Amino acid sequence: MNPLIGITLDSEEAGGYSKSPWYALRKNYCEAVRTAGGVPILLPHHADCVDRYLALIQGLIVSGGAFDVDPALFGAAERHEAVVLKPGRTTFELALVRGALERDMPVLGICGGEQLVNVALGGSLIQHIPHAVAGGLEHEQTAPRHLPGHEVALTPGSKLAAIAGCAAIPVNSSHHQAIREVGAGCIVNAIAPDGVIEGIEMPGKRFCLGVQWHPEYNVSPADAALFRAFIEACR
């Protein structure tokens, strides 16, 4: 049986696509899961349904989106003006991630999802890279996301390095925040040339891994390999 993979949705207020509030997810998330051998299902933001969702799925993907985690959740006294909050989404995803990890369910965090996983584990975030990282790279690339924005160096001995089978990979880049301090039990598995953390994982879990880029765009063979490894861990 191909494992059922829950993917969290982004949410938007009325306007644009719909005159009513709406959920959003790019098709390539689902296509990447299906290509790797999983069956994607989408998870609306109902915190009272978390236990039921987790009883149904075999793996969890926390997607990216146009949102930031509330800095108050990692102890910041101030909020940068660039930070955009979606409290309902964050509350739901925190409960979902913590419940999944309690069950040792495989978890893959992508971009903002990686940041959310880190905060769920007690880590903190850089609220706005251009403000905090002197001479930093352009982490919100202007090129299309199917093209690389920069390379990341993979940590020797990490699960991600083993999956990729190499020391460095090209990645796309679409984020203004990044991990500052890693959560409990995590290690850094990828770093950008400017020192920005680009990936984390929990060696003590069956599969808990987050990347700052969007592997669903399949920029390099390592992206497809990451989805395959995740789906295999869900079997």
Image (cartoon, grey):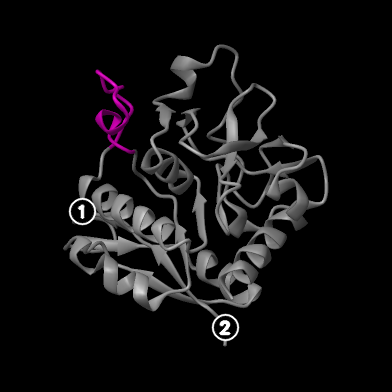
Which segment did they paint magenta?
Answer: 69-84
Q: Is residue 54 above or below residue 184?
A: below
Magenta-colored stretch includes residue 204: no
Q: Residue at x 30, y 29 (%)?
A: 71
Q: Nearer the viewer, residue 127 or 148?
A: 127
Task: Please provide percent x and percent y for residue 3.
Answer: 53, 79
Is residue 79 located in the magenta-colored stretch of the structure?
A: yes
**Residue lying farthest to the bottom in this orientation:** 1
Q: Is residue 176 above or below residue 117?
A: above
| Secondary-structure class at tag 2 | loop
In the image, residue 229 above or below residue 186: below
Q: Is residue 173 left or right of residue 8?
A: right
Mark toward the viewer: 2 or 1: 2
- Residue located 48% across and 64% down the image: 105
Mark 2 vs mark 1, CA separation in Å:
34 Å
Q: Which residue is mark 1?
A: 13
Instruction: Please state the horizontal and vertical placement of residue 150, each as a whole percent of the image.
Output: 69, 35
**Majority secondary structure in the magenta region:** loop
Q: Nearer the viewer, residue 3 or 172?
A: 3
